[in-house]
Image (tube, helix red, strand yellow):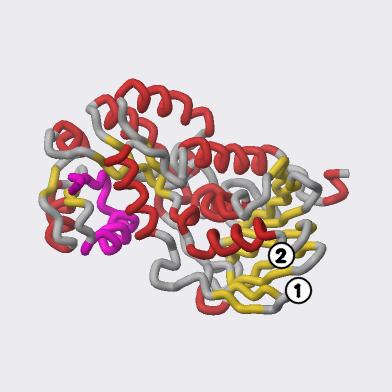
Amino acid sequence: MTIHLAFLGCGNVTRAHSRTLRRSDEVRRYYASRDRGVAEDASRRFGGAGAFGSYREALEDSRIEAVLVATPPDSHLELTLEALARGKHVIVEKPAFLRSADFVPVRAAAERAGRRVLVAENYAYKPLARAIQRIVASGTLGEIRFVNLVAVKQQRSGGWKDDAAIAGGGALFEGGVHWVDLFAHLGLVVESVHGFRPEPGEGLERSMAVVARFAGGGIGTLYHSWEIPSPLRGLRISRIYGTRGSLAFESNGLVVAVTSPRPRLIFPGIRDISGYRAMFHDFFECIGSGREPRMTLARAQHGIELIESAYANARATTLEEVR
């Protein structure tokens, strides 16, 4: 089965996904932009099957079975609802919607249309995530006491990412949504979160710390930043500590080191280290079969809810204020 997919938007995300899908037999790709020349150029460069000079033109084309919403976040909800009304399946880029409440009308519209809405959260498909989940579930580490997930690097934003009305949030929302999803799905259940903003000033943050309490009493910390240098523009070490053992892992997924009780190195796999190929394979299979994807709407909504909670109490930026 080959799916006819139209990209809505031809920016960096569309270019990245096009490279992933270029050799896929599961999809035939089309490109839509508010500038027809941009869409035609994208179609030529990435071996597309056609181009559209507006999003509406793509949504009205009977050949198109699914769309991938790759526009800035403030337009995701409107385009998703319009696509569903036109009978299209929807893959929507992260962060899917500006508010967790936006998932309610989307879920209702998808049920009415009999179509799927899939959130392009590739971290749910990373080999690293599966490796850690297996280790935690095995009991090798015992009861988990501490998790420290480090996701810091220097990254320029600019453009719509610096506009709160368009982006919806700062670094924790725009990029951190990836890490919040990973943080919440290591094999532990997050019961509560508290956000801390270490940087001074107003406006969109570029650094945030999130402290979580897991079911069973474990404590987790997530450090996320777009302004802290790191080796190779993003090489970081994260750790999980349990009552019987611990593990350290390169945050992007290069290697996992189980330090006890049976020391070993695990290489989750670099061929699809970011999980994009597995994600799209899952999505296209779900569209064809109707089964649930690994990255469900409920999971995506929960991630936004956690970020909203972190932002809501981030005004308490010191331990003294929390006390």
Helix, strand or loop at disc 2? loop
Mark 1 sits on what residue?
A: 261
Q: What is the x, y in percent for residue 129?
A: 54, 59
Q: Is residue 23 above or below residue 260?
A: above
How many labels sit on residues? 2
Which class describes the residues within 10 Å of circle 1: few (<14), some (14-19), or many (20+)?
few
Camera-nearest residue between 106 and 258? 258
Task: State the residue at coordinates (36%, 50%).
Answer: 282
Camera-nearest residue between 53 and 124? 124
* Residue 319 on the magenta span: no
* 239 relative position to 255: left or right: right
Q: What is the x, y in percent for residue 121?
A: 45, 50
Q: What is the x, y in percent for residue 35?
A: 17, 46
Callout 2, which amino acid? Thr
Camera-nearest residue between 314 and 273? 273
Mark yes or no: residue 24 visible: yes
Task: State the residue at coordinates (69%, 51%).
Answer: 210
Callout 1, which amino acid? Pro
Label drawn at residue 140: 2
C-beta proximity under 8 Å, tags 2 and 1:
yes
* 158 relative position to 185: left or right: left
Which class describes the residues within 10 Å of circle 2: few (<14), some (14-19), or many (20+)?
some
Label drawn at residue 274: none
Mark yes or no: residue 75 visible: no
Task: State the residue at coordinates (59%, 37%).
Answer: 305
Range of magenta residues:
1-23
Q: Is residue 103 above or below residue 127?
A: above
Task: Give the Cα distance between marks 2 and 1.
Answer: 8 Å
Identify the image quadrant of residue 276. Answer: bottom left
* 315 relative position to 165: left or right: right
